[in-house]
Amino acid sequence: QVQLVESGGGLVQVGGSLRLSCAASGNIYSRNFMGWYRQAPGKERELVAGIFTGGTTKYADSVEGRFTISREVAENTVYLQMNSLRPEDTAVYYCNYRVLTNAFEVWGQGTLVTVSA
């Protein structure tokens, strides 16, 4: 069993910043991927940013250069620093944990990010 605890969402003005955190606990595999997805009303869930235990990262084109994902491997925690926020970044953000050697994955409960114009 793996549990994810998210924090850091909220309301921010255009151009502002927020930092999301996701802490994983339980039976953590050493080779895993942790990432942040988001889902806006009426849209499909999409990958925002992700990071592998080796440190490789991936970003959606829409957030490249504005968002930074990082992780503390020893604490199984990932952070998403979001800068220069835009109204189109408004969504529920979900943390995802995925084991690389099998299909096991876990989703967080989601945290709402609202960017006001």
Image (spheres, rainbow, N blue to C red):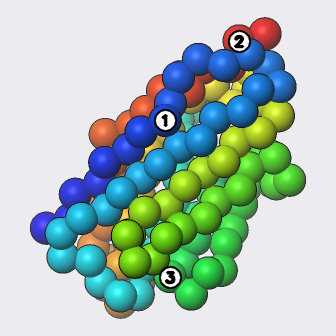
Give left or right: position of 8 versus 13: left
What's the amino acid at mark 3?
A: Thr
For marks 1 and 2, give the CA distance. Answer: 16 Å
Q: Nearer the viewer, mark 1 or mark 2?
A: 1
In the rendered structure, are the residues bearing label 1 and label 2 in contact, judged by CB atoms less than 8 Å apart? no
| Kind of element beneath mark 1 | loop
- Of callouts 1 and 3, the N-terminal one: 1
Residue pointed to by mark 2: 116
Residue pointed to by mark 1: 8
Please say whether residue 4 is visible from this viewpoint: yes
At x 69%, y 68%, the residue is: 58
- Of callouts 2 and 3, the N-terminal one: 3
| Kind of element beneath mark 3 | loop
What's the amino acid at mark 1?
A: Gly
What's the amino acid at mark 2?
A: Ser
Give left or right: position of 116 versus 113: right
CA neighbours of label 1 inside 10 A, class few (<14), some (14 to 19), many (20+): some
Give left or right: position of 4 versus 35: left
Please state the horizontal and vertical placement of residue 65, each as a whole percent of the image: 86, 53
6 or 42: nearer the viewer: 6
- The label shown at residue 53 is 3
Asked which quadrant contains residue 70, the reply is bottom right
For marks 2 and 3, give the CA distance. Answer: 34 Å
Above or below for 88 versus 108: above
Q: Quadrant of the N terminus?
A: bottom left
At x 66%, y 19%, the residue is: 12
Please state the horizontal and vertical placement of residue 50, each as a whole percent of the image: 58, 64
In the rendered structure, are the residues bearing label 1 and label 3 in contact, judged by CB atoms less than 8 Å apart? no
| Kind of element beneath mark 2 | strand
Numbered disc total: 3
